[in-house]
Image: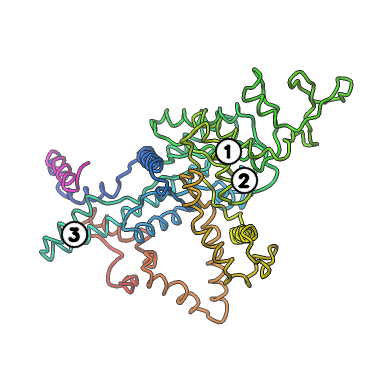
Amino acid sequence: MSTYQDDIQSVANLKSAQGSAWDAINPESAARMRAQNKFKTGLDIAKYTADIMRVDMAAFDQDKTKYTQSLGCWHGFVGQQKLISIKKHFGGKTDRRYLYLSGWMVAALRSDFGPLPDQSMHEKTSVASLVEELYTFLRQADARELGGLFRGLDAAREAGNSAEEAKIQDQIDNHVTHVVPIVADIDAGFGNAEATYLMAKQMIEAGACALQIENQVADEKQCGHQDGKVTVPHADFHAKIRALRYAFLELGVDNGVIVARTDSEGAGLTKEIAVVNEPGDAGDIYNSYLDVEEIDVADMGEGDVVFNRGGKLVRPKRLPSGLYQFRQGTGHERCVFDCIGAINAGADLLWIETAVPTVHEIKGMMDDVRKVHPDAKLVYNNSPSFNWTLNFRQQAFDAMVEAGNDVSAYDRAKLMSAEYDETELSAVADERIRTFQADTAREANVFHHLITLPTYHTTALSVDNLAKEYFGEQAMLGYVKKVQREEIRQGIACVKHQNMSGSDMGDDHKEYFAGENALKAGGAKNTSNQFG
């Protein structure tokens, strides 16, 4: 990898070959612009981040404490602030911290139709556009941070401080990028396998190295935490998994990561009776979970759908919608069946949607999967759709009952009440929540933990608090005390919002392009100087 000085020399060599037309070109300015634009295309990013994920997956196989995490994003600025914060709080490193792109948030916040439910009704192109936007903001975070180092380098030179100059030079050459892997939600593929392939290519070209696809029917898709989910037979789902792999291979992202999600735990319906080529194949097993009744030919009604199962004529229960119903209580088995099949079809990671977050349930399914695929790794949705406080207080309550402890002070049905916030039960529950990710990484081989919609909720909460203060008695103090003063105290970079938007970088470029004729915005009258 070339150093900053290598790039300066490279441009200087080009300049010398071009004659007087390039006299005004400063090789060091050009080298700075190169350093600030490490990734030239989305495919550069996808290849780079895919390699990161593969290294992280291998490390996790050796040490279950090395699980990875991400938070969902709905705007490039949100993703940028996360990574700036991660670097600030964790020693300048981004190790094992990713971003998640949620289809739910794209539907709810990014569609031209306005807010939509998570049913794949939003524009297909909006997902790839958000991937591109996220990486645009992350690359700008790199450029902004490097711009500060360049200004520090200039100051050290002017002061004749060679030690400081060498230190900053090293920071430039070993700069840690804000660009990290994005796990991107492609829903159920937005159509048939060809549509899935085309959309996958667009997302990969924008920079996505990991695509998450679910086994629901594309035109009946529901949010993973809502009712009415309809799954597809394995042949349909596996064709889409292969479509993703072909998209990665076509674009040269050979290490691309496929996350196969099963919604079977909460999906009681299917749109199709699977094709069976021979007894015991995937189609036969899929059909074995259908809720059927054995009938005689004479009992067949007009328009009935029937099929042969083990030499007997059976009629699956069909709803007025035309959908078929699975037998109650088969969700666990179908999830395991889906996961094993998905890995056989080429998926790299699994995702199981569950009704509640419990270590033992996730472990139970993964234990069964790992009997066939010992290295199977899971991505788990730490979803805001779960009431984490209530669920874990109930789990703690049940554990106390099982241990023979006195629980007479608690009403299990009302454990969400604030009156329990400072109790022993609450403390036990909160500790279980705190260790949930580490526990499931160790017990259930969860490689990646994500929260799909955190910034949706934090935005709503912070705006609600600001509006209450600002439009109430606190007026301007509501903003100053609760927002700006906290930004300053905590060193939040965007308190200098002009700098965050690229104003200082623009000034640098103006100076490169126009020299001393440049009209710059960052002079003495810039009020951002009040922030030091």
Q: Residues within 10 Å of mark 1 (few under 14, many from 20)?
A: many
Q: Is residue 181 above or below residue 520?
A: above
- The three-letter code of the residue at mark 3 reads Leu
Quick one: label 2 or label 1, which is nearer the N terminus? 1
Q: Nearer the viewer, mark 3 or mark 1?
A: 1
Residue wearing tag 1: 214
- The three-letter code of the residue at mark 2 reads Gly
Residues marked 2 and 1 touching at CB (< 8 Å): yes
Q: Nearer the viewer, mark 3 or mark 2?
A: 2
Residue wearing tag 3: 153
Quick one: label 3 or label 2, which is nearer the N terminus? 3
SS for callout 3: helix
Q: CA distance from mark 3 to mark 1?
A: 49 Å
Q: Position of residue 222 (x, y in %)?
A: 65, 44
Q: In which quadrant will I find the N terminus?
A: top left
Q: Quadrant of residue 220?
A: top right
Q: Which residues are magenta?
A: 1-17
Quick one: label 3 or label 1, which is nearer the N terminus? 3
Residues marked 3 and 2 touching at CB (< 8 Å): no
Q: Position of residue 391 (x, y in %)?
A: 62, 57
Q: Which residue, as the protein is rendered here, is positioned at the far bottom?
A: 473
Q: Is residue 456 left or right of residue 226?
A: left
Q: Position of residue 464 (x, y in %)?
A: 57, 68
SS for callout 2: loop
Q: In which quadrant will I find the C terminus?
A: bottom left
Q: Position of residue 411 (x, y in %)?
A: 69, 66
